[in-house]
Image (cartoon, rainbow, N blue to C red):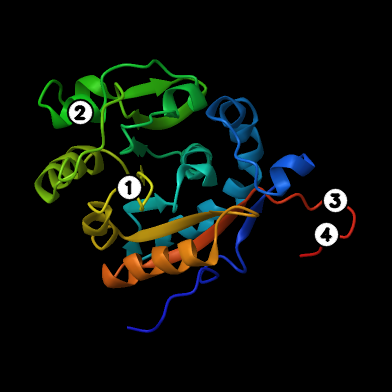
């Protein structure tokens, strides 16, 4: 397999701007800050990402995994904005599944009801149909949140559990977007990365290191994942001297 590049598929990477010099130079944004303004800012990136998640006439993209080296990259917010944008443009059912049940944020990001989700599903406490939520604000979007926060233990996202979850979600959705736990925290994502139709990587300007990028790409290449493209968050192009 040829070596993967983070710039493949979506130009040289999409920039999700965040204002503030402090953020630019790598100070981590809190979850509250990301929830407050991240979704709105992510709309710009989502507008350029969604056309790459349609597929071709003879091969639709039915499953996409959004990954990141760590949670500071904001990939869950970009994934949510992309799913909502895809649903709005295609006017078909789009699924959004939060696999990071250790640190669930999608309910707050989308302003939907926080109820049982992936965490409870994996423990056999609910089924997908009873756990999914829908919002009038985001038509055609079907969301399965992470549910109640619980430790991300090795093997929790086993191949059999993921396949059951995928079967339930994808049978009723045109495309399903999965939000992965940070790759450095969950080796189980190697399984899913190689089985979905495509992977989008989020990286954070001023925070994500070259070593993290290399490790992420190595995981994806080992999994024989199809890398669709990358999203660069946390860069402020309005600062003096900034250049593309």
Q: Residues within 10 Å of mark 1 (few under 14, many from 20)?
A: some
Q: Which mark is residue 128?
A: 2
Evaluate whether residue 153 shows in this view. Answer: yes
Whole-percent x and y of residue 160?
9, 47
Residue in the image at 54% along x and 55% along y: 203
Residue beneath disc 1:
185
Helix, strand or loop at label 3? It is loop
Q: Which mark is residue 218?
A: none
Quadrant of residue 114 within the rendered picture:
top left
Towards the viewer: 37 or 168: 37
| Residue lying at the far bottom of the rendered structure | 2
Q: CA distance from mark 4 to mark 1?
A: 33 Å
Give the mark toward the camera: 2 or 1: 1
Q: Earlier in the sequence, mark 4 or mark 2?
A: 2
Q: Are marks 4 and 3 in contact (CB under 8 Å)?
A: yes
Give the mark toward the camera: 3 or 1: 1
Label count reads 4
Q: CA distance from mark 4 to mark 2?
A: 46 Å
- Note whether 52 is above or below 112 in the view shown: below
- Note whether 172 is above or below 54 in the view shown: above
Residue beneath disc 4:
242
Q: Which mark is residue 239?
A: 3
Q: CA distance from mark 2 to mark 1?
A: 25 Å
Q: Are marks 3 and 1 in contact (CB under 8 Å)?
A: no
Give the mark toward the camera: 2 or 3: 3
Give the mark toward the camera: 4 or 1: 1
Q: Earlier in the sequence, mark 3 or mark 1?
A: 1
Towards the viewer: 135 or 67: 67
Towards the viewer: 149 or 170: 149
Residue in the image at 12% along x and 20% along y: 125
Q: Earlier in the sequence, mark 2 or mark 3?
A: 2
């Amino acid at each position: 397999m040829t070596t993967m590049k983070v710039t493949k598929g979506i130009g040289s990477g999409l920039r999700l701007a965040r204002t503030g010099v402090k953020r630019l130079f790598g100070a981590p944004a809190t979850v509250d800050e990301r929830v407050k303004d991240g979704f709105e800012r992510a709309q710009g990136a989502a507008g350029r990402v969604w056309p790459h998640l349609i597929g071709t006439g003879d091969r639709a993209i039915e499953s996409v995994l959004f990954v990141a080296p760590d949670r500071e990259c904001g990939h869950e917010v970009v994934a949510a904005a992309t799913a909502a944008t895809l649903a709005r443009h295609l006017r078909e059912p789009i699924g959004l599944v939060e696999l990071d049940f250790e640190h669930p944020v999608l309910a707050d990001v989308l302003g939907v009801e926080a109820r049982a989700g992936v965490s409870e599903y994996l423990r056999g406490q609910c089924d997908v149909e009873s756990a999914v939520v829908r919002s009038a604000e985001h038509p055609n979007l079907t969301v399965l949140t992470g549910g109640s926060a619980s430790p991300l233990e090795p093997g929790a996202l086993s191949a059999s559990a993921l396949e059951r979850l995928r079967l339930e979600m994808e049978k009723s959705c045109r495309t399903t977007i999965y939000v992965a736990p940070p790759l450095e925290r969950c080796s189980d994502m190697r399984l899913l990365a190689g089985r979905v139709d495509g992977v989008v990587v989020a990286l954070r300007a001023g925070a994500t290191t070259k070593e993290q990028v290399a490790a992420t790409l190595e995981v994806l290449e080992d999994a024989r994942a199809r890398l669709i493209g990358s999203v660069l968050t946390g860069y402020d192009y309005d600062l003096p001297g900034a250049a593309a």
